[in-house]
Structure formats: C-alpha cells, structure tokens
Amino acid sequence: MKKLSIIVPCYNEQETIDIYLQEMKQVEANMSLEFEYLFVNDGSKDDTLLRLKAAANQYTNVNYISFSRNFGKEAALIAGLEAVTGDLITVMDVDLQDPPELLPEMYEKIQEGYDIIGTRRYNRVGEPMIRSFFAKKFYQIINRISDTEMVDGARDFRLMTRQVVDAVLELTEVNRFSKGIFSWVGFNTYYISYENRERSAGETTWNFWSLFQYSLEGIINFSEAPLIFSTLVGLGSCIISMLAMIYFFVSSLLKQNQVPGWPSLVCIILFLGGLQLFCLGIVGKYIGKIFTEVKKRPNYIIEESHCKSED
C-alpha cells in the first residue's frame, strides 16, 4: 500500500486542529492509502503545540515538528518536505480552506499519470474586495515579467509524487516562494478548480501587508524586471533632465533675461533624487537577498519533534 504524507503548517491554530483531523479521518477511511500526518508548529503562541501532542497520543499516524520560533510558512513547508517519507505528498492548510474531499479525485488523477495535481480557486467569495483585486493584479504582473508561469488562484494544496518533491528539495535557496518553485520544477501538472471556502474556525494571520510583502518576494525571486525597470527609469530621468535644461536655456535666450531658475532647479533636483532613491531601493532589495543567501543560515530550527519514523 502506498503512503500519503500530509504536511500541515500551523501558526496559532489551536481551534482548528481537532476539526481538521475529524474531517481528514473520514476521508482517510475511504481511501486505499496509508496516511501519515506531519504538523509543523511554526512558533505558535497559543496552545497549538499542546493540541498537537494530544493528537499524536490519540492517533498513531500523527506526527509533529515544533520550531524554536516563528520562521514563516515557507520554512514550515520545506521542513515538512524534508521530513516526510511518503510515496505521495500533499500540503494542506489546517483551517480546511483546502477541501479534504478533493483528495480522492486528486489521487485518481495521479493514477492517470500526472506528477502534480494542483488546486485553484475559481472565485474569491468571502474575501475582501481589495485583497481579491490586488491578488489578481499580482498574477497578471508576475506572468508578464517572469518566465515561470503561475496559475491565478493556485493553492499550496497539491498532491505530488516523490520525484517532484525530490526535485523541489534540490532547490536549496533560503529566499523561497513555494508557488513559483512548484511551477519552476515543471512536471506534468493538472489543476482542479473549486469554490473558495472560508476558515473552519479561528482568524487568519495573513493581513493585507503580509500578503503584499509575500507578493514582492515572488516578484523578486522569479523576475529581474524590477532591475530593468529601475535602469529604464534612470535613463528616462536623464533624458527628461537634459530636455529641461535645453528648454530653460533657449527660453532664457529668447526672453533676453536671466530667468531666476531656482524653482525649476529645485524641482529637477527633487525629481532626480527621488528616482535615485527609488532605484537604489530596488537594487538594495536584490542585494539583501544575496546577503541572506550567502550567510547560509538554516531555514528553521527545530525545538521539539515527535515522528513515529524516528522511534
């Protein structure tokens, strides 16, 4: 019997763990697979770890890893991928926004010869309008400026073969953007669409600012377009400044008066200074990524773990 490893990142999810396991146990009973659950506690500040310990004592196939602090979802994902032992691997959110009832259909598609069965939301019902608007714009922008295609509405919830996971683990960068990485490695992929679902309990820790920062990570990690843009902006500002200088020089000659000129001079200086700082900010962001990579710090630190395979 093949083993299905399920990676479940958790951050302050004490209210959802039991609900999630109840739903998953119903799915597990109807599938001819050996299930392995690996919860990754990403430095939660509530009773998430206590709930995971209780679940591990209750169910023989529930394991957990607990970080020493909050390292972020990307660290939780890579920790899970490195730890699981299944023939098939999937990543799920514990809040049940990833429908467990899709797993049988995803498994059927895997048996048809696909390497990755992804899921995508075909709508964003229940999500704030401004967040939906910017999410759609992000996918439009990233697909224009990046060679790696990313599917609008795609979730981390995907069923993968061991070959795919091994390929993902070969990418050892610290600055990770999983949606881009899963697309970059390629393989034969099929997407299943479903209607957006709201959380089963608790509150999301993802606000607009954190999602905005996450989108910037994706753009910087998978595109050099911002660097090209800053170069073009710098070139354009030089051309505009030269044209402005020619205009003021000719205007001064025609009027046969020396124009005071300080307002235009101040405007030009402020304009160029702002552009320079903007472009330096873009370049600095890339340099910061390089700085993080060369330090070679680990993606995460495990404080406590309970894995049956280790016993």
Image (cartoon, rainbow, N blue to C red):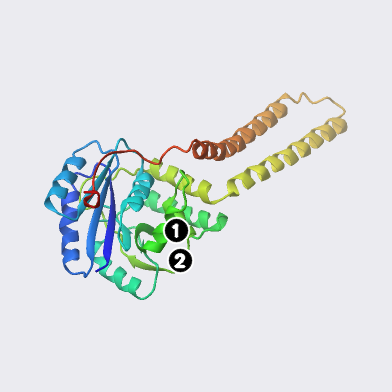
Given the image, on which type of amino acid does mark 1 rest?
A: Ala
**Which residue is rendered at x = 27% and y = 62% of the image?**
4
Q: Which amino acid does label 2 sit on?
A: Phe
Query: Which of the labelled discs sits on residue 167, or is there none?
Result: 1
User: Front-most of 99 and 165?
Assistant: 165
Residue 34 picture location, percent across and down: 22, 64
Q: Residue at x 35, y 50 (%)?
A: 77
Mark 2 Cα shell of 10 Å, populated few (<14), some (14-19), many (≥20): some
Which residue, given by chain and number where applicable, does mark 2 sit on? 187
Q: In this view, does 166 lie to the left or right of 1?
A: right
Q: In which quarter of the image is residue 250?
A: top right
Q: How many angstroms separate mark 2 from mark 1 (CA)?
A: 10 Å
> Along the polypeptide, which appears first: circle 2 or circle 1?
1
Corner quadrant of residue 26:
bottom left
Q: In this view, does 87 lie above or below 198?
A: below
Displayed quadrant of residue 213: top left
Task: Indicate the position of residue 189 as horizontal and vertical percent values.
Answer: 42, 67
Disc on res. 261: none
